[in-house]
Every structure is written in C-alpha cells, then in structure tokens.
Image (tube, rainbow, N blue to C red):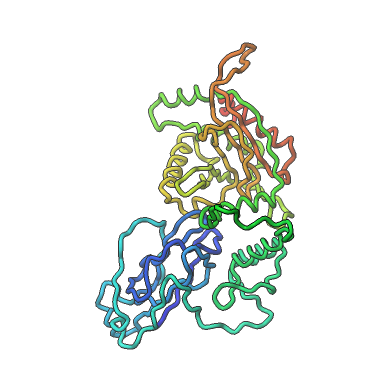
C-alpha cells in the first residue's frame, strides 16, 4: 500500500521565511523521481527550483502561481510505496522511493521530465482523487488549535504585524486552515493607512491598465517602502574631477592581465573610505536601540537585469585588490544578466555602490538598501569645463552623491567620507596610503 507523504517548503537559507510560486513543474497524477524539481519559487530576487525528497505519484499541489508560501507550509503530497510494496509504477523511471532532500539549485531549463500514469496503475489500492493544479488544493487535516493561539507559521508575518501595530488575533487568515499569510497583514496595513472614503480617488481611471504588483517588483517595492518608512536618510553630493582616475585606469589596462573596470576602482576607493569611516559600514537594529558596526565590508552594487534591478554582493571586499574586485564584479554582473544569482549572492550587504552614470544621468538621491546605513552614487563621467591649476580646462567630471542613515552618524562624518572619496577620484595616488 502506498503511503502519502507531505513535503513542505524548506528553509532556503539566508533567513528567508517564504517564497512565491512562479511555476509548477509537475501535475497531479504524475509520477516523479526522488529529488526531481517540482516547483519554481521566487525569493530574495532569485528564482529557485525546489526538488522533492520523495518519489511516487503526485496527489496534491498547494499554492497557485503568484501566491506566497511560508517556509514550513505544505507544497506537495506524494503517494510513496511502502517498504516491500509492489506498486505498478515501481518499475518505471519515477519509481516511488524516498530519501533525504539533497538541495536545490537556481532555475534553468531542464526539459520535460514527466511520466504520466493513470491513477489506477500507480498502486494496487485506489489513489487519492486528482486535484487540478490550477485550483487551490485541499488543506491537510486540520490540527486542533487552542483559542488563544494565532494561526501563524512565518516569523516574517509576525514581525510585519508587530512593526505596523496589527493585532493578529483580529485577522482572518486566507491560508490553509485559516493560516495568516503576509498578504493578510498587508491588507490590514493598507486598510489602516487608507484615507477616508470621501477623499479616496476611484480605484481605476477609465482606460487605465491595472498591473498586479508581484514577484520581483513586489520584493523591490516592499524593501524600498520599508527603507523609506524606517530610515531617516539624508543626501549630500559633490562634483569631482575624474581625469586622473581615468588616466590611471588606462595605464593599468596597458599592462598584461585582466582589464580593470571603473567600477572596480570605485569599489576599491569605497573600501578605503569605509576603513577610515567605519561608522558608515553599519546598520541599526530592528528595534532601533543599537547600531551594529560590521567588521567586514560586504559590498553591494546595483545591477540592471532583464528581471529588474538587483544588488549582488561582493563578500569581504576589503580583502580584495583591484584586479580581484574587477573579476568578482564581472562574474556577479554576468550572473545577474543571466538570472543565475543565488539568494546568498543577493543578501547580506553592508554598503552599496550605485553607478547610475551608466544610464547617462548626473545625479540621484537613491533610497538606501535596507538595512544598510549608506550608499555611494556615481553619475556619468563626462567632459565639462573645470578650473584646473588656476586655468579653465575641459576635464572628465563626475557628480558623487552620498545617502546615509542619519541615526548612525552626523553630517560631519558623512561629509568627511564623501570628501575622501572625491579626493581619491581626483588624486587616485592617495589610495597608496591605505595599502
């Protein structure tokens, strides 16, 4: 006789507490092999394939495309052959066996692995009735819950409710067995913040296009919205003559070895500046009572991909020379364009470098990458009139902007950081003092 096994969404690492269903890779009634990917989910701006540790016949799928599933919530149930069983499907390519989950990988094209069978051929005993993947599958058998216990699995949901003063006991959950989901808390927050009905504008204007905020765009919106609400950010800026920096890059690239990028030189300047101003390589604790100063510089940099803006992270950037920084920045940029960044490569940053000059603009006042305390922005490097050594000349000029969390330092520290960066751009030989 087959045994029905329930597989829940595993912990995908880096403190992630949920994931959004992007694409189901199997159907109810299908025979699957051990560790066969069954669903693509999106979390931390990465699309990840999740393999199932059981082999057998799929009996139910939980979660529609676009729905968020908390870690620990059911994903799929599989009818697995009991030890010594004699299922008819046992001789096929998807023989229903069981062993521990071996891991997950970044989504990539793997082709079709499906081997459909009729429910009657899957086992001697009748299999559970198939449930269409597109419709919500029945929840597992209810578990008795004491009246005082709020049905919440995700720590993220609890934290979000606490931050916005939402009483979870007053919410009706939309998940299985009344489980409270992040979407339920978000609706309560939006309802509390909504203006009075008399002042409310129509939901949609005639002829307007309504685009659901989901996936990567929703992830970005939530993070930037939280940053804007929680961090008292300020921005200062200065123009800098980058002529000598560009000349240094040309000189370095005439020598054998990897070609040094402008971004790598700017990254090296940032690590030197953070060594001098460590207050800015920090974050504020969630309750706002402590400043956490980080010893390592995990340098994030903004990169545009086909799926939107992502911020890959160079680990321990303070330990890397200019060539190593060039190599690592190029590797992560290529992975971003290919959509192959892992959650670990997208999280854990302590400082961000934002080169918006690639878009042909001079200045910006970016929103901080929560929970980081600072971000350096670099505009385009372009010929401009400039007074150089008392004479008017055409020089390669860039505008530098610096956004910082005013809780971690005052304007004098932020101004000192930005001035040091500008001086290194104008006189890159100053970096020799920090080597």
Indicate the position of residue 101 as horizontal and vertical percent values: 41, 69
Indicate the position of residue 107 as horizontal and vertical percent values: 40, 57
Horizontal side of residue 149 vs 207, given as left or right:
right
In terms of image quadrants, where is residue 190?
bottom right
Indicate the position of residue 193 as horizontal and vertical percent values: 71, 59
Residue found farthest to the left: 91
Horizontal side of residue 402 vs 199, given as left or right:
left
Horizontal side of residue 227 vs 88, given as left or right:
right
> Would you place residue 104 above or below residue 297 in this image?
below
Locate the N terminus and report the quarter of the image it occupies: bottom left
Q: Can the viewer see residue 435?
A: no
Residue found farthest to the top: 391
Name which residue lies at 46% across and 38% down: 324
In terms of image quadrants, where is residue 272?
top right
Name which residue lies at 57% across and 24% down: 397
Name which residue lies at 64% across and 66% down: 185
Indicate the position of residue 234 as horizontal and vertical percent values: 70, 40
Horizontal side of residue 150 vs 143, given as left or right:
right
Locate the C terminus and report the quarter of the image it occupies: top right
Name which residue lies at 53% across and 45% down: 316
């Amino acid at each position: 006789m087959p045994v029905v096994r329930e597989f829940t969404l595993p912990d995908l690492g880096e403190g992630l507490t949920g994931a959004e269903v992007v694409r189901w890779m199997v159907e109810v009634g299908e025979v699957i092999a051990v560790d066969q990917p069954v669903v693509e989910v999106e979390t931390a701006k990465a699309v990840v394939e999740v393999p199932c540790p059981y082999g057998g016949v799929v009996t139910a799928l939980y979660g529609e495309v676009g729905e968020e599933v908390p870690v620990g919530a059911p994903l799929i149930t599989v009818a697995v052959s009991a030890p010594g069983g004699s299922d008819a499907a046992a001789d096929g390519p998807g023989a229903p066996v069981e062993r521990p989950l071996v891991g997950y990988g970044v989504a990539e094209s793997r082709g079709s692995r499906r081997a459909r069978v009729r429910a009657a051929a899957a086992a001697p005993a009748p299999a559970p009735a198939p449930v269409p993947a597109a419709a919500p599958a029945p929840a597992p058998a209810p578990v008795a819950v004491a009246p005082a216990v709020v049905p919440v699995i995700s720590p993220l949901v609890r934290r979000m409710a606490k931050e916005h003063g939402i009483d979870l006991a007053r919410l009706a959950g939309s998940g299985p067995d009344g489980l409270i989901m992040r979407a339920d808390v978000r609706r309560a927050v939006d309802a509390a913040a909504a203006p009075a009905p008399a002042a409310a504008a129509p939901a949609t204007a005639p002829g307007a296009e309504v685009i659901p905020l989901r996936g990567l765009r929703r992830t970005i919106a939530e993070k930037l919205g939280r940053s804007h609400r929680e961090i008292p950010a300020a921005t200062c800026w200065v123009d800098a003559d980058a002529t000598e920096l560009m000349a240094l890059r040309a000189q370095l690239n005439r020598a054998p070895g990897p070609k040094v990028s402008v971004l790598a030189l700017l990254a090296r300047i940032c690590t030197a500046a953070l060594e001098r101003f460590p207050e800015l390589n920090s974050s504020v604790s969630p309750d706002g009572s402590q400043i956490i100063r980080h010893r390592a510089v995990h340098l994030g940099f903004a990169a545009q991909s086909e799926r939107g803006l992502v911020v890959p992270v160079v680990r321990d950037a303070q330990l890397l020379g200019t060539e190593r920084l060039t190599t690592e920045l190029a590797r992560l940029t290529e992975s971003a364009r290919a959509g192959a960044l892992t959650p670990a490569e997208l999280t854990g940053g302590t400082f961000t470098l934002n080169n918006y000059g690639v878009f042909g603009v001079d200045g910006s006042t970016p929103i901080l990458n929560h929970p980081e305390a600072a971000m350096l922005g670099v505009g385009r490097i372009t010929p401009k009139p400039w007074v150089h050594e008392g004479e008017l000349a055409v020089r390669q000029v860039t505008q530098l902007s610096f956004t910082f969390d005013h809780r971690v330092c005052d304007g004098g520290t932020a101004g000192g950081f930005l001035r040091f960066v500008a001086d290194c751009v104008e006189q890159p030989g100053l970096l020799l003092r920090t080597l």
